[in-house]
Image (cartoon, rainbow, N blue to C red):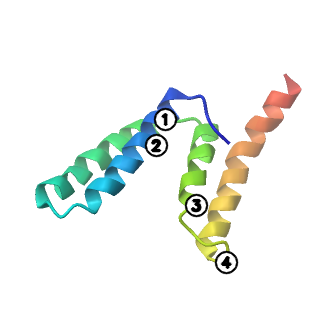
Amino acid sequence: MESNSELVRVIRVLIERQRRLMHSSDLRERFHTLWIAALLDEHLTQCTDREIGELMVIVQERFHIFEPEFGICYHAKRRLLVPSMKENLTR
C-alpha cells in the first residue's frame, strides 16, 4: 500500500535518516537523532488517521509475525484504514 501523500513520503525519509544516524559511530551524528525525532513528531501530528495507518506498515515490518507487537500493529492499522476505505466506497 503506497501513499501519494507528500507528508507520508517526508516521514518515511525522516524515519530512514533517524535509523541511519542512530547506528553512527560518531557521537555528534547520534545526537542528531533527537532533532530528527522532534521533526518526526511535528510531521506525525499533521497526519490523518489513514496516513498513520499507512505508516504502521513500516512499524509492522520490524516485527516477526509471531511477536505480539506484530498483532498490535496489524489491528491498529486495520482500525485506522478500514473507516477511510468505507468512506471511499460510499462516495
C-alpha separation, residue under disc 3 versus residue under disc 2: 13 Å
**Horizontal and vertical percent for residue 64?**
61, 72
How crowded is the residue under tag 2: few (<14 C-alpha within 10 Å), some, or many (20+)? some
Dot 3 or dot 2: first in sequence order is 2
Labels 3 & 1 near each other (Cβ < 8 A): no
Are the residues flagged by discs 4 and 3 in contact, CB closer than 8 Å? no
Please report the residue visible at 70 percent of the width from the left and 60 percent of the height from the top.
75
Crowdedness of circle 4 by 10 Å Cα count: few (<14), some, many (20+)? few
- Residue at far right of view: 90
Pointer 4 or 1: first along the chain:
1
- Residue identifier under label 2: 12
Q: Nearer the viewer, residue 31 or 29?
A: 29
Q: Give residue 79's mark.
A: none
Nearest the camera: 65 or 82?
Answer: 65
Q: Which mark is residue 66?
A: 4
Q: Is residue 29 left or right of residue 72?
A: left
**What residue is disc 1 on?**
9
Between the residue at mark 4 and the residue at mark 3, the CA separation in whole angstroms equals: 12 Å
Q: What amino acid does circle 3 point to?
A: Glu
